[in-house]
Amino acid sequence: MALRIELKPFEELFISHSVITNGPSRIAFAVSGTSPLVRGRDYLRREDVDTICRELQFAIQALYLEGADGATALSKVEPLAGEILKRLPVLSPHISEVVAQVDAGDLFKALKASRTLVAREGEIHSLVSAEAL
């Protein structure tokens, strides 16, 4: 079954090692196959990596787009996950979910779970900043 994609003007779509950039008008098309893809609005750029949880998300995104196998991905993700647990143990359930998805070889679900992790990290930083005032 094909995945229907609609791109806004100048929106990007990352497919494996390639980037499709739309022109000045909207476009709709279907993508068939198993190549990993990430919409431009969901893509985390290297220059936007400013926290350890975003570092983990960026690593998973790269592994997903490269088509890495579960064992390779796990060896790259576990050290970062361990560091996050040391710094922010409250994120343990979210880290467990990310690592479980990587271990299962489902890097797409791991990427989705890492976005939730990053959102939760942001909430924690906001609470800490508010309390410091």
Image (cartoon, grey):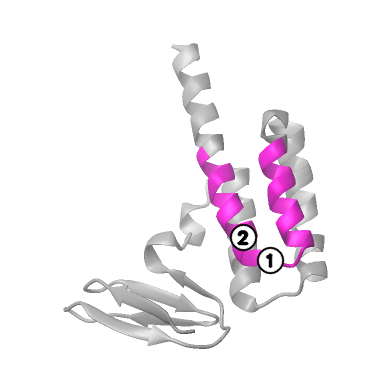
Work out which quarter of the rendered image holds the C terminus and state it.
top left
Residue 117 is covered by the magenta coloring? yes
Q: Is residue 24 left or right of residue 38?
A: left
Residues rendered magenta in the picture: 93-119
Secondary structure of the residue carrying numbered label 1 = loop
Task: Please state which amino acid type lies under the numbered disc 2.
Answer: Lys
Residue 101 counted in the magenta span = yes
Residue that sits furthest to the bottom in the current view = 32
Where residue 61 appears, x then y in whole percent? Answer: 58, 64
Disc 2 marks which residue? 109
Inspect the image, locate mark 1, and give the three-letter code of the amino acid beneath it. Asp
Q: Nearer the viewer, residue 72 or 70?
A: 70
Q: Judging from the image, what secondary structure is the residue with disc 2 in?
A: helix
Q: Residue at x 82, y 62 (%)?
A: 75
Residue depicted at x 59% and y 55%: 57
In which image quadrant can residue 20 be found?
bottom left
Task: Give me the residue at 83% from left, 68% from top.
Answer: 71
Which image quarter: residue 9? bottom left
Q: Which mark is residue 106?
A: 1
